[in-house]
Amino acid sequence: MVLTGFMATGKSTVGRQLAARLRYGFVDTDRLIEERFGPVPKIFRTQGEERFRAIERELASELAALPALVIATGGGMLVDSAVADVFIGAGSLVVSLVADVDTIYQRVGGERAGERRPMLAVANPRQRIAELVAERESAYARFPQVRTDTNSSARIVDEIVALM
């Protein structure tokens, strides 16, 4: 079971609750990358986004082979169709969590978003969120979508379980 979607759509929060409901293990790919390679912002700054995406591809192959696992991916991980295909090929259900731009903007810290989110370290983070959401929309649309800005996390978990 894989959760994808833009940053701050609730992948980690919902993923933990879903894993508990299913009695599965839980992995947050960004946290796992940080454990193995250091902070994500530092990887972006010192090695670049291309290296970060390569790490994500390697991790996808590793995790796809593991049973009984809920995987919360980084926001851009399944935008790469090769990564998506790894999970789909392994028989994983992939669900995209979605929220509107204003909700995401608030969840990432508003104007201070760039302090923790390297992709948002720009003059107008809200505008950048809108641009990135638009760019990634078709990639996320490949998968069943569940809204996270209008439902409680318990309801979101119920919707995902029903998709299974």
Image: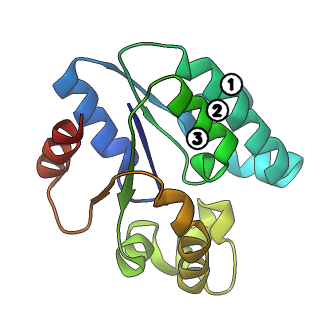
Residue 35 visible in the shown view: no
Q: Is residue 54 above or below residue 110?
A: above
Residue 48's spot in the image, x, y percent?
85, 52
Q: CA distance from mark 1 to mark 2?
A: 5 Å
Task: Name the quadrant containing residue 13.
Answer: top left
Disc 3: which residue: 84
Q: CA distance from mark 1 to mark 3?
A: 22 Å
Q: Amino acid at mark 1?
A: Arg
- Please state if 33 lies on the left or on the right of 152 as rendered: right
Q: CA distance from mark 3 to mark 2?
A: 18 Å
Residue beneath the point at 58% across and 47% down = 78
Q: Which mark is residue 33?
A: 2
Crowdedness near tag 2: few (<14), some (14–19) or many (≥20) residues, C-alpha within 10 Å:
some
Residue beneath the point at 43% across and 29% down = 92
Q: Nearer the viewer, residue 43 or 143?
A: 143
Task: Name the quadrant containing residue 29.
Answer: top right
Q: Are marks 1 and 2 in contact (CB under 8 Å)?
A: yes
Residue beneath the point at 19% across and 36% down = 161
- Please state if 59 lies on the left or on the right of 4 as rendered: right
Residue 25's spot in the image, x, y percent?
35, 18
Task: Please tell me whether mark 2 sits on a helix, a strand or a loop.
Answer: helix
Disc 1: which residue: 36
Which of pointers 1 and 3 lies earlier in the amino acid sequence?
1
